[in-house]
Amino acid sequence: MHPLHEHINRQIKLSNADFDTLIGYFKTVHFKKGDQIILPQQSITHQYFVLKGCLRTFLLDANGKEHTIQFAVENWWVSDYIAYYKNTDAVLTVECIEDCALLKIDQADIHVLFDKVPLVERFFRLQLENAFVAFQTRILSNLRETAEKRYLLFIKAYPDIEQRVKNYQIASFLGITPESLSRLRKQRIASK
Amino acid sequence: MHPLHEHINRQIKLSNADFDTLIGYFKTVHFKKGDQIILPQQSITHQYFVLKGCLRTFLLDANGKEHTIQFAVENWWVSDYIAYYKNTDAVLTVECIEDCALLKIDQADIHVLFDKVPLVERFFRLQLENAFVAFQTRILSNLRETAEKRYLLFIKAYPDIEQRVKNYQIASFLGITPESLSRLRKQRIASK
DNA sequence: AGCTGAAATTGACCTATGATAAGAAAAGGA
DNA sequence: TCCTTTTCTTATCATAGGTCAATTTCAGCT
Protein backbone atom coordinates (compact mmCIF):
# COMPACT_ATOMS: atom_id res chain seq x y z
CA MET A 1 0.00 0.00 0.00
CA HIS A 2 1.15 3.53 -0.76
CA PRO A 3 2.86 5.08 2.29
CA LEU A 4 0.51 8.06 2.18
CA HIS A 5 -2.53 5.79 2.07
CA GLU A 6 -1.17 3.86 5.06
CA HIS A 7 -0.53 7.13 6.85
CA ILE A 8 -4.06 8.39 6.21
CA ASN A 9 -5.60 5.08 7.19
CA ARG A 10 -4.09 5.38 10.63
CA GLN A 11 -6.72 8.11 11.20
CA ILE A 12 -9.63 7.23 8.95
CA LYS A 13 -10.50 4.51 6.47
CA LEU A 14 -10.06 5.87 2.97
CA SER A 15 -11.20 3.64 0.08
CA ASN A 16 -8.82 2.87 -2.76
CA ALA A 17 -11.01 4.89 -5.10
CA ASP A 18 -10.87 7.94 -2.84
CA PHE A 19 -7.15 7.53 -2.38
CA ASP A 20 -6.68 7.40 -6.14
CA THR A 21 -8.58 10.66 -6.42
CA LEU A 22 -6.42 12.17 -3.72
CA ILE A 23 -3.04 11.01 -4.94
CA GLY A 24 -3.81 12.50 -8.34
CA TYR A 25 -3.42 15.94 -6.83
CA PHE A 26 0.04 15.20 -5.45
CA LYS A 27 3.28 15.49 -7.33
CA THR A 28 6.51 13.75 -6.35
CA VAL A 29 9.51 16.05 -6.03
CA HIS A 30 13.15 15.36 -5.16
CA PHE A 31 15.64 17.55 -3.37
CA LYS A 32 19.24 17.20 -2.33
CA LYS A 33 20.79 17.55 1.08
CA GLY A 34 21.27 21.21 1.90
CA ASP A 35 18.54 22.44 -0.43
CA GLN A 36 16.31 25.07 1.13
CA ILE A 37 12.88 24.39 -0.26
CA ILE A 38 11.04 27.20 1.48
CA LEU A 39 12.61 30.60 2.11
CA PRO A 40 11.42 33.77 3.87
CA GLN A 41 9.37 36.13 1.72
CA GLN A 42 8.20 33.41 -0.63
CA SER A 43 4.52 32.95 -1.17
CA ILE A 44 3.52 29.55 0.24
CA THR A 45 0.49 27.77 -1.16
CA HIS A 46 1.68 24.21 -0.76
CA GLN A 47 2.73 21.62 1.75
CA TYR A 48 4.79 18.45 1.55
CA PHE A 49 4.43 14.89 2.76
CA VAL A 50 7.79 13.24 3.44
CA LEU A 51 8.30 9.96 1.58
CA LYS A 52 12.00 9.77 2.30
CA GLY A 53 14.55 11.98 3.99
CA CYS A 54 14.79 14.45 6.84
CA LEU A 55 14.03 18.17 6.93
CA ARG A 56 14.11 21.01 9.38
CA THR A 57 11.89 24.10 9.74
CA PHE A 58 13.50 27.06 11.42
CA LEU A 59 13.32 30.80 11.90
CA LEU A 60 16.40 32.86 11.13
CA ASP A 61 16.21 35.87 13.43
CA ALA A 62 17.62 39.38 13.06
CA ASN A 63 20.82 38.37 14.89
CA GLY A 64 21.46 35.53 12.48
CA LYS A 65 20.40 32.89 15.00
CA GLU A 66 18.37 29.88 13.99
CA HIS A 67 15.38 28.70 16.02
CA THR A 68 14.20 25.26 15.02
CA ILE A 69 10.47 24.71 15.14
CA GLN A 70 10.41 21.15 13.99
CA PHE A 71 12.09 18.30 12.25
CA ALA A 72 10.30 16.14 9.71
CA VAL A 73 11.09 12.58 8.70
CA GLU A 74 9.19 9.91 6.79
CA ASN A 75 5.38 10.28 7.08
CA TRP A 76 5.51 13.81 8.47
CA TRP A 77 4.07 16.88 6.83
CA VAL A 78 6.08 20.02 6.35
CA SER A 79 5.55 23.59 5.23
CA ASP A 80 5.71 27.08 6.67
CA TYR A 81 2.32 26.59 8.23
CA ILE A 82 2.15 30.13 9.53
CA ALA A 83 2.30 31.38 5.95
CA TYR A 84 0.23 28.50 4.60
CA TYR A 85 -2.72 28.96 6.95
CA LYS A 86 -2.60 32.74 7.17
CA ASN A 87 -1.92 33.29 3.45
CA THR A 88 1.03 35.49 4.23
CA ASP A 89 4.60 35.36 2.94
CA ALA A 90 6.92 32.79 4.47
CA VAL A 91 8.88 33.75 7.56
CA LEU A 92 10.41 30.33 8.06
CA THR A 93 13.05 28.33 6.22
CA VAL A 94 12.59 24.65 5.38
CA GLU A 95 15.85 22.88 4.68
CA CYS A 96 16.70 19.34 3.62
CA ILE A 97 19.01 17.66 6.12
CA GLU A 98 19.23 14.65 3.80
CA ASP A 99 18.34 13.95 0.19
CA CYS A 100 14.55 13.98 0.12
CA ALA A 101 11.63 12.53 -1.79
CA LEU A 102 8.48 14.51 -1.08
CA LEU A 103 4.87 14.62 -2.19
CA LYS A 104 3.78 18.15 -2.91
CA ILE A 105 0.22 19.43 -2.88
CA ASP A 106 -1.24 22.85 -3.38
CA GLN A 107 -3.70 24.42 -0.94
CA ALA A 108 -6.21 25.10 -3.71
CA ASP A 109 -6.19 21.41 -4.63
CA ILE A 110 -6.63 20.40 -1.01
CA HIS A 111 -9.72 22.58 -0.86
CA VAL A 112 -11.05 20.95 -4.00
CA LEU A 113 -10.40 17.59 -2.36
CA PHE A 114 -12.21 18.67 0.79
CA ASP A 115 -15.34 19.22 -1.25
CA LYS A 116 -14.92 16.11 -3.40
CA VAL A 117 -14.01 13.73 -0.58
CA PRO A 118 -15.24 15.00 2.79
CA LEU A 119 -13.25 12.28 4.57
CA VAL A 120 -10.11 14.10 3.47
CA GLU A 121 -11.20 17.20 5.32
CA ARG A 122 -11.80 15.00 8.35
CA PHE A 123 -8.30 13.56 8.02
CA PHE A 124 -6.71 16.99 7.96
CA ARG A 125 -8.80 18.08 10.93
CA LEU A 126 -7.57 15.06 12.88
CA GLN A 127 -3.99 15.82 11.85
CA LEU A 128 -4.43 19.34 13.18
CA GLU A 129 -5.80 18.00 16.45
CA ASN A 130 -2.68 15.92 16.88
CA ALA A 131 -0.41 18.81 15.98
CA PHE A 132 -2.31 21.04 18.38
CA VAL A 133 -1.78 18.58 21.21
CA ALA A 134 1.89 18.17 20.31
CA PHE A 135 2.51 21.91 20.34
CA GLN A 136 0.61 22.41 23.58
CA THR A 137 2.63 19.64 25.16
CA ARG A 138 5.83 21.28 23.94
CA ILE A 139 4.84 24.66 25.37
CA LEU A 140 4.15 22.97 28.69
CA SER A 141 7.47 21.21 28.55
CA ASN A 142 9.27 24.49 27.86
CA LEU A 143 7.47 26.11 30.77
CA ARG A 144 8.12 23.44 33.34
CA GLU A 145 11.28 21.51 32.48
CA THR A 146 14.96 22.42 32.63
CA ALA A 147 17.03 22.31 29.46
CA GLU A 148 18.55 18.99 30.53
CA LYS A 149 15.17 17.38 31.09
CA ARG A 150 13.93 18.66 27.75
CA TYR A 151 16.96 17.18 26.06
CA LEU A 152 16.33 13.80 27.66
CA LEU A 153 12.68 13.96 26.68
CA PHE A 154 13.67 14.86 23.14
CA ILE A 155 16.02 11.93 22.64
CA LYS A 156 13.49 9.62 24.21
CA ALA A 157 10.61 10.89 22.05
CA TYR A 158 12.59 11.07 18.80
CA PRO A 159 15.50 8.61 19.03
CA ASP A 160 15.35 8.27 15.25
CA ILE A 161 15.64 12.00 14.63
CA GLU A 162 18.48 12.52 17.08
CA GLN A 163 20.71 10.29 14.94
CA ARG A 164 19.98 12.19 11.76
CA VAL A 165 20.46 15.83 12.72
CA LYS A 166 23.29 18.02 14.00
CA ASN A 167 23.63 18.82 17.67
CA TYR A 168 23.46 22.53 17.01
CA GLN A 169 20.11 21.91 15.35
CA ILE A 170 18.85 20.02 18.39
CA ALA A 171 20.12 22.85 20.59
CA SER A 172 18.17 25.38 18.56
CA PHE A 173 15.07 23.18 18.90
CA LEU A 174 15.49 23.05 22.68
CA GLY A 175 16.09 26.78 22.89
CA ILE A 176 19.66 26.59 24.17
CA THR A 177 23.10 27.21 22.67
CA PRO A 178 25.22 24.41 21.19
CA GLU A 179 27.74 25.04 23.98
CA SER A 180 25.09 24.43 26.61
CA LEU A 181 23.93 21.27 24.93
CA SER A 182 27.51 20.05 24.81
CA ARG A 183 27.83 20.67 28.54
CA LEU A 184 24.59 18.81 29.26
CA ARG A 185 25.74 15.85 27.23
CA LYS A 186 29.04 15.78 29.07
CA GLN A 187 27.40 15.86 32.49
CA ARG A 188 25.04 13.14 31.42
CA ILE A 189 27.90 10.84 30.43
CA ALA A 190 29.77 11.68 33.64
CA SER A 191 26.76 10.73 35.77
CA LYS A 192 26.46 7.27 34.24
CA MET B 1 -27.32 37.88 16.33
CA HIS B 2 -26.20 35.24 18.82
CA PRO B 3 -22.57 35.79 19.85
CA LEU B 4 -21.69 32.24 18.85
CA HIS B 5 -23.29 32.70 15.43
CA GLU B 6 -21.31 35.90 14.97
CA HIS B 7 -18.16 34.14 16.06
CA ILE B 8 -18.71 31.27 13.61
CA ASN B 9 -19.57 33.64 10.80
CA ARG B 10 -16.17 35.25 11.08
CA GLN B 11 -14.85 32.02 9.53
CA ILE B 12 -17.69 30.65 7.42
CA LYS B 13 -21.23 31.65 6.54
CA LEU B 14 -23.62 29.51 8.56
CA SER B 15 -27.34 29.84 7.76
CA ASN B 16 -29.82 30.58 10.52
CA ALA B 17 -31.30 27.12 10.05
CA ASP B 18 -27.90 25.45 10.48
CA PHE B 19 -27.11 27.63 13.46
CA ASP B 20 -30.40 26.65 15.07
CA THR B 21 -29.48 23.02 14.61
CA LEU B 22 -26.09 23.69 16.13
CA ILE B 23 -27.17 25.75 19.12
CA GLY B 24 -29.59 23.00 20.07
CA TYR B 25 -26.65 20.88 21.10
CA PHE B 26 -25.22 23.53 23.42
CA LYS B 27 -26.24 24.12 27.00
CA THR B 28 -25.68 27.36 28.90
CA VAL B 29 -23.89 26.95 32.21
CA HIS B 30 -22.88 29.45 34.89
CA PHE B 31 -19.93 29.39 37.24
CA LYS B 32 -18.63 31.66 39.94
CA LYS B 33 -15.24 33.27 40.27
CA GLY B 34 -12.80 30.75 41.68
CA ASP B 35 -14.70 27.69 40.49
CA GLN B 36 -12.48 25.06 38.94
CA ILE B 37 -14.54 23.59 36.15
CA ILE B 38 -12.02 21.03 34.94
CA LEU B 39 -9.68 19.18 37.29
CA PRO B 40 -6.88 16.66 36.75
CA GLN B 41 -8.03 13.05 36.50
CA GLN B 42 -11.50 13.94 35.31
CA SER B 43 -12.75 12.44 32.09
CA ILE B 44 -13.21 15.27 29.57
CA THR B 45 -15.70 14.88 26.75
CA HIS B 46 -16.77 18.49 26.43
CA GLN B 47 -15.57 21.96 25.61
CA TYR B 48 -16.88 25.41 26.40
CA PHE B 49 -17.47 28.59 24.45
CA VAL B 50 -17.12 31.71 26.60
CA LEU B 51 -20.16 34.00 26.53
CA LYS B 52 -19.04 36.08 29.49
CA GLY B 53 -16.14 36.01 31.91
CA CYS B 54 -12.49 35.07 32.03
CA LEU B 55 -10.85 31.70 32.62
CA ARG B 56 -7.40 30.22 32.86
CA THR B 57 -6.04 26.82 31.87
CA PHE B 58 -2.95 25.68 33.75
CA LEU B 59 -0.88 22.71 34.74
CA LEU B 60 -0.16 22.16 38.40
CA ASP B 61 3.19 20.38 38.53
CA ALA B 62 4.66 18.01 41.12
CA ASN B 63 6.32 20.93 42.95
CA GLY B 64 3.03 22.72 43.32
CA LYS B 65 3.87 25.26 40.64
CA GLU B 66 1.32 26.46 38.14
CA HIS B 67 2.11 26.79 34.44
CA THR B 68 -0.51 28.73 32.54
CA ILE B 69 -1.23 27.52 29.03
CA GLN B 70 -3.86 30.01 28.14
CA PHE B 71 -6.42 32.53 29.21
CA ALA B 72 -9.89 32.62 27.72
CA VAL B 73 -12.28 35.56 27.52
CA GLU B 74 -15.47 36.22 25.56
CA ASN B 75 -15.62 34.30 22.26
CA TRP B 76 -12.78 31.94 23.12
CA TRP B 77 -13.06 28.19 23.47
CA VAL B 78 -11.75 26.37 26.48
CA SER B 79 -11.20 22.80 27.64
CA ASP B 80 -8.34 20.50 28.48
CA TYR B 81 -7.70 19.90 24.82
CA ILE B 82 -4.98 17.35 25.47
CA ALA B 83 -7.55 15.17 27.24
CA TYR B 84 -10.34 16.13 24.86
CA TYR B 85 -8.53 15.21 21.66
CA LYS B 86 -6.61 12.25 23.01
CA ASN B 87 -9.53 10.84 25.01
CA THR B 88 -7.39 10.63 28.12
CA ASP B 89 -8.03 11.92 31.63
CA ALA B 90 -7.49 15.60 32.28
CA VAL B 91 -4.04 16.77 33.31
CA LEU B 92 -4.91 20.45 33.30
CA THR B 93 -7.03 22.66 35.52
CA VAL B 94 -9.50 25.18 34.12
CA GLU B 95 -10.42 27.87 36.60
CA CYS B 96 -12.82 30.81 36.47
CA ILE B 97 -11.04 34.10 37.08
CA GLU B 98 -14.39 35.88 37.01
CA ASP B 99 -18.03 34.81 37.19
CA CYS B 100 -18.65 33.04 33.89
CA ALA B 101 -21.43 32.24 31.46
CA LEU B 102 -20.41 29.43 29.15
CA LEU B 103 -21.89 27.32 26.39
CA LYS B 104 -21.08 23.68 26.90
CA ILE B 105 -21.05 21.01 24.20
CA ASP B 106 -20.14 17.37 24.26
CA GLN B 107 -17.70 15.80 21.84
CA ALA B 108 -20.22 13.16 20.79
CA ASP B 109 -22.67 15.89 19.85
CA ILE B 110 -20.02 17.75 17.90
CA HIS B 111 -19.39 14.61 15.90
CA VAL B 112 -23.09 14.27 15.21
CA LEU B 113 -23.07 17.89 14.07
CA PHE B 114 -20.08 17.28 11.80
CA ASP B 115 -22.12 14.70 9.93
CA LYS B 116 -25.35 16.70 9.94
CA VAL B 117 -23.80 20.03 8.97
CA PRO B 118 -20.45 19.59 7.21
CA LEU B 119 -19.81 23.33 7.44
CA VAL B 120 -19.47 22.89 11.18
CA GLU B 121 -16.60 20.49 10.69
CA ARG B 122 -15.03 23.07 8.40
CA PHE B 123 -15.45 25.72 11.07
CA PHE B 124 -13.69 23.60 13.67
CA ARG B 125 -10.91 22.79 11.24
CA LEU B 126 -10.37 26.50 10.63
CA GLN B 127 -10.38 27.12 14.38
CA LEU B 128 -7.71 24.49 14.77
CA GLU B 129 -5.63 26.08 12.03
CA ASN B 130 -5.71 29.37 13.90
CA ALA B 131 -4.84 27.69 17.18
CA PHE B 132 -2.02 25.83 15.47
CA VAL B 133 -0.56 29.07 14.15
CA ALA B 134 -0.97 30.76 17.53
CA PHE B 135 0.87 27.97 19.34
CA GLN B 136 3.64 27.84 16.78
CA THR B 137 4.06 31.58 17.07
CA ARG B 138 4.23 31.25 20.84
CA ILE B 139 6.88 28.53 20.67
CA LEU B 140 8.91 30.77 18.38
CA SER B 141 8.49 33.67 20.73
CA ASN B 142 9.66 31.57 23.66
CA LEU B 143 12.69 30.43 21.68
CA ARG B 144 13.82 33.81 20.43
CA GLU B 145 12.67 36.51 22.84
CA THR B 146 13.78 37.46 26.33
CA ALA B 147 11.29 37.39 29.18
CA GLU B 148 10.98 41.18 29.02
CA LYS B 149 10.19 41.17 25.30
CA ARG B 150 7.63 38.42 25.76
CA TYR B 151 5.95 40.43 28.50
CA LEU B 152 5.74 43.47 26.25
CA LEU B 153 4.38 41.35 23.42
CA PHE B 154 1.82 39.85 25.78
CA ILE B 155 0.42 43.13 27.00
CA LYS B 156 0.38 44.42 23.46
CA ALA B 157 -1.39 41.34 22.08
CA TYR B 158 -3.85 40.98 24.96
CA PRO B 159 -4.33 44.39 26.59
CA ASP B 160 -7.83 43.30 27.60
CA ILE B 161 -6.64 40.16 29.33
CA GLU B 162 -3.80 41.86 31.19
CA GLN B 163 -6.35 43.96 33.08
CA ARG B 164 -8.40 40.97 34.15
CA VAL B 165 -5.83 38.54 35.50
CA LYS B 166 -3.29 38.47 38.32
CA ASN B 167 0.35 39.24 37.66
CA TYR B 168 1.44 35.88 39.02
CA GLN B 169 -0.82 34.29 36.44
CA ILE B 170 0.79 36.30 33.66
CA ALA B 171 4.21 35.32 35.03
CA SER B 172 3.27 31.64 34.87
CA PHE B 173 2.09 32.16 31.29
CA LEU B 174 5.43 33.75 30.35
CA GLY B 175 7.39 31.03 32.11
CA ILE B 176 8.97 33.25 34.74
CA THR B 177 8.46 33.80 38.48
CA PRO B 178 6.22 36.55 39.82
CA GLU B 179 9.35 38.12 41.33
CA SER B 180 11.01 38.32 37.92
CA LEU B 181 7.92 39.83 36.37
CA SER B 182 7.86 42.40 39.14
CA ARG B 183 11.47 43.31 38.34
CA LEU B 184 10.72 43.63 34.63
CA ARG B 185 7.78 45.90 35.34
CA LYS B 186 9.90 48.07 37.57
CA GLN B 187 12.67 48.43 35.00
CA ARG B 188 10.11 49.27 32.39
CA ILE B 189 8.68 52.10 34.46
CA ALA B 190 12.18 53.36 35.29
CA SER B 191 13.12 53.54 31.62
CA LYS B 192 10.14 55.67 30.71
C1' DA C 1 44.20 9.68 1.54
C1' DG C 2 44.60 14.51 2.54
C1' DC C 3 42.62 19.08 2.80
C1' DT C 4 39.29 22.18 4.19
C1' DG C 5 35.44 24.11 6.34
C1' DA C 6 31.89 22.89 9.54
C1' DA C 7 30.65 21.12 13.95
C1' DA C 8 31.56 19.98 18.59
C1' DT C 9 33.93 20.68 22.76
C1' DT C 10 36.13 23.14 26.48
C1' DG C 11 37.25 26.92 29.66
C1' DA C 12 36.75 31.56 31.63
C1' DC C 13 33.71 34.81 32.55
C1' DC C 14 29.08 37.18 32.64
C1' DT C 15 24.09 37.94 33.13
C1' DA C 16 19.26 36.96 33.52
C1' DT C 17 16.39 34.66 36.18
C1' DG C 18 15.39 31.56 40.21
C1' DA C 19 15.08 30.88 45.41
C1' DT C 20 14.19 32.57 49.71
C1' DA C 21 12.54 35.72 52.95
C1' DA C 22 10.35 39.78 54.55
C1' DG C 23 7.50 43.66 54.22
C1' DA C 24 3.95 46.55 51.70
C1' DA C 25 -0.14 46.81 49.21
C1' DA C 26 -4.35 45.27 47.61
C1' DA C 27 -8.47 42.47 47.60
C1' DG C 28 -12.25 40.11 49.73
C1' DG C 29 -15.26 38.72 53.57
C1' DA C 30 -17.69 39.68 57.84
C1' DT D 1 -15.09 49.59 57.83
C1' DC D 2 -11.95 46.52 59.81
C1' DC D 3 -9.56 42.22 59.55
C1' DT D 4 -7.59 38.45 57.13
C1' DT D 5 -5.73 36.56 53.20
C1' DT D 6 -3.80 37.01 48.94
C1' DT D 7 -0.87 39.36 45.88
C1' DC D 8 2.93 42.30 44.81
C1' DT D 9 7.33 44.21 45.63
C1' DT D 10 12.03 44.45 47.15
C1' DA D 11 16.52 42.78 48.54
C1' DT D 12 20.11 39.35 48.74
C1' DC D 13 22.24 35.46 47.15
C1' DA D 14 22.64 31.29 44.08
C1' DT D 15 22.75 29.14 39.62
C1' DA D 16 21.61 27.72 34.84
C1' DG D 17 22.63 29.03 30.78
C1' DG D 18 24.76 32.65 27.53
C1' DT D 19 28.97 34.76 25.40
C1' DC D 20 33.38 34.71 23.59
C1' DA D 21 37.49 32.58 22.20
C1' DA D 22 40.53 28.72 21.47
C1' DT D 23 41.00 23.85 20.25
C1' DT D 24 39.74 19.45 18.71
C1' DT D 25 36.98 16.45 16.04
C1' DC D 26 34.39 15.34 12.20
C1' DA D 27 32.46 15.31 7.42
C1' DG D 28 32.52 16.31 2.71
C1' DC D 29 35.26 17.19 -1.16
C1' DT D 30 38.84 16.45 -4.74
Image (cartoon, coloured by chain):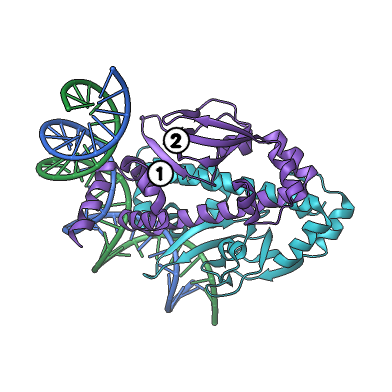
Chain colours: A cyan, B purple, C blue, D green
Return the residue nearer the eye: B33 or B44: B33
Residue A160 tag number: none
Is A147 situated above or below C27? below
- What's the residue at 52%, 36% (across, down)? B101
Residue beneath label 2, please? B59
Q: Secondary structure at mark 1?
A: helix
| Residue B47 sits in quarter | top right
| Residue B63 sits in quarter | top left
Q: Amino acid at mark 1?
A: Leu
Residue B82 x %, y %: 57, 38
Residue beneath label 1, please? A143
Return the residue nearer the eye: D17 or B46: B46
Residue A35 x %, y %: 58, 72
Mark 1 to mark 2 CA distance (whole Å)? 10 Å
Of badges 1 and 2, nearer the viewer stands 2
Q: Are marks 1 and 2 in contact (CB under 8 Å)?
A: yes
Is B166 situated above or below C10? above
Number of numbered discs overlaid on the protein picture: 2
Observer able to see residue A160: yes
- What's the residue at 52%, 51% (across, down)? A162
